[in-house]
Image: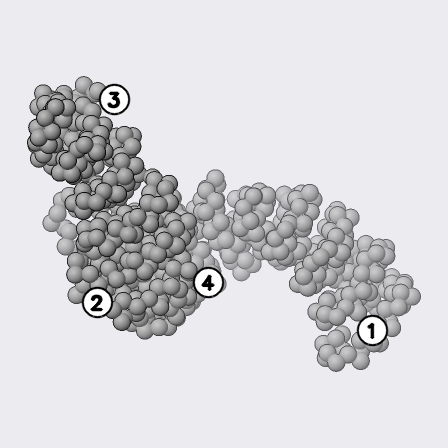
Amino acid sequence: LFFSPLQEVTASSRHYVDRLFDLDPQKVLQGVIDMKNAVIGNNKQKANLIVLGAVPRLLYLLQQESSSTELRTECAVVLGSLAMGTENNVKSLLDCHIIPALLQGLLSPDLKFIEACLRCLRTIFISPVTPEDLLYTDATVISHLMALLSRSRYTQEYICQIFSHCCKGPDHQTILFNHGAVQNIAHLLVSTSYKVRMQALKCFSVLAFENPQVSMTLVNVLVDGELLPQIFVKMLQRDKPIEMQLTSAKCLTSMCRAGAIRTDDSCIVLKTLPCLVRMCSKERLLEERVEGAETLAYLIETDVELQRIASITDHLIVMLADYFKYPSSVSAITDIKRLDHDLKHAHELRQAAFKLYASLGANDEDIRKKIIETENMMDRIVNGLSESSIKVRLAAVRCLHSLSRSVQQLRTSFQDHAVWKPLMKVLQNAPNEILVVASSTLCNLLLEFSPSKEPILESGAIELLCSLTQSENLALRVNGIWALMNMAFQAEQKIKSDILRGLSTEQLFQLLSDSDVNVLMKTLGLLRNLLSTRPHIDHIMSTHGKQIMQAVTLILEGEHNIEVKEQTLCILANIADGTTAKELIMTNDDILQKIKYYMSHSNAKLQLAAMFCISNLIWNEEEGSQERQDKLRDMGIVDILHKLSQSSDPNLCDK
């Protein structure tokens, strides 16, 4: 243990520890009780006692069979009080292996002692320095805790609180679910104790989060003849405490997102959604506004109708603008400590507002317009892109991405605010989760009607996007190649050449043999865009013809779906449209045989694409058309055309 000169360890603190070693058990008990009274609310005293080694002795007394139950209980109470101090105190307790000792204590027959151990465990587990996994190291612990739920309202409150703090992610959810958490905790929602009801509710909110299995089970659970969703709805009512309203709204939101409750169910549309909008008002405390907005963003994220309803509920879009202006709620203005706290956490509000704006504007053009017309909105997003908090940056990029789906906005607001500049900056060495959303946004800014396309090209985008196509991360590869595809659409020849140079032939083949069909389709889309307009086709095929023909052959011979083959035949049709490029097809018997094969394929899309190739090769007014027609006639193409002219498909017939 380290002694710091600042902690003058007072004689009185030493006196408390010395009494723990007395030979008379009665004096030891009195010593522990005096220690309990001395440490309550006194952080300095707590630190002194820890430094002097009180913890190992208290744990020893707690575990001794010979200690009286009263002594063991008082030891647990003092340890719980020490844990209430600073995070360093909790670390010291963990280092002394307090958790196994307390879990062992839960096997005692004495209820008061069990409750004291649980209270101390609760305090330790809710500390951010305690690893949740310590609860799951021994499989028997969870089933024992489930069994203790029936003992008293205190065991119920503490155990539910432990579960809700230690349930992080799907693995923990599954363990608790398999140990009967739903059945054991459901009836606590109607307990006479508010604290028990509240902790049980929190349990359900973490168990159901992003978990379809739990959510689907909850829908059908009955408590006192009432279904759980109905109980949650009662807990949403305005006369209930805010934390209860918010937590039950979270439960219903998780169930809705998992598909256990329909998005048009009245408990979502008329109860959950309006409750969450209420939480965004500037009357509410900062944490409530953050949680309300984030939960609402999650609820409406994938449903257009809910987005529309939310956008016209209580002027939500304008209300969210206050998230950037007033970090403190109206009721907190008189409280200096609160104001200070809220200023430090104001970034959480901005993050939540960006997230909710992103969800609101995900699909509807009118909502996007309303968001962008909210005061200084574009400036706020641009500022958000360069904030120090990674969460704010990510949320701002998400918001920008959502708004960039609008053709109208790309042409106006995005241009007026030169959004591409901060976006390109975000794309330099950002973590993957930001890169994925930022590169998706860039894809939209590179569409041909977007005025940002030119300046983005000048700022080194090609190099950046080519490097994304080499990423291990699938989403980044897709976005990199997608953005290049958009960039190549109706672009001038120099840009096309730069893209091909930036990608390199090896990388192109790498992408064409990618295991993901999305990457493959976008790469073919890129090739198709590169090979458009005659002079470009001839120029590119004169420099990269051999490799491109190889790639086309590779794909037409591979095991690929109809869409992939169709896209590849369209590329061939583009090549066939070139003046000099045609010859690369005409001199390649293998490719000609493949075109012939696809003309007689069972799929009409592929037959049509193959006929495009033929029609581009045989235009009468083009030089050498006679020789090309003769060669194709000799191959038996005319016979196939005769057969197809009798086809029942009108498109094939016409062609």
Q: Which residue is mark 3?
A: 1
Q: Which residue is mark 2?
A: 237
Residue 7: x and y in percent read 16, 23
Query: Residue 486 falls in which quadrant of the image?
Result: bottom right
Residue 568: x and y in percent read 71, 59
Instruction: Look at the numbered discs 1 and 2 and tell me whether their residues touch, using CB distance below 8 Å.
Output: no
Q: Element at badge 2?
A: loop
The mark nearer the N terminus, 2 or 4, is 2
Residue at x 17%, y 21% (from the top left corner): 6
Instruction: Look at the numbered discs 4 and 3 and tell me whether their residues touch, using CB distance below 8 Å.
Output: no
Report the mark closest to the observer, 3 or 1. Answer: 3
Q: Amino acid at mark 1?
A: Leu
Cα–Cα gap, marks 2 and 3 = 52 Å
Answer whether residue 360 is visible to the viewer in this image.
no
Q: Element at badge 3?
A: loop
Q: Element at badge 1?
A: helix
Q: Which residue is mark 4?
A: 406
Question: Furthest-front residue in view?
Answer: 66
Badge 2: few (under 14), some or many (20 or more) residues near its Cα, within 10 Å? some
Q: Amino acid at mark 4?
A: Ser
Query: Which of the numbered marks, if any, corresponds to residue 641?
Result: 1
The mark nearer the N terminus, 1 or 2, is 2
Instruction: Look at the numbered discs 2 and 3 and tell me whether their residues touch, using CB distance below 8 Å.
Output: no
Residue at x 48%, y 53% (from the top left corner): 441
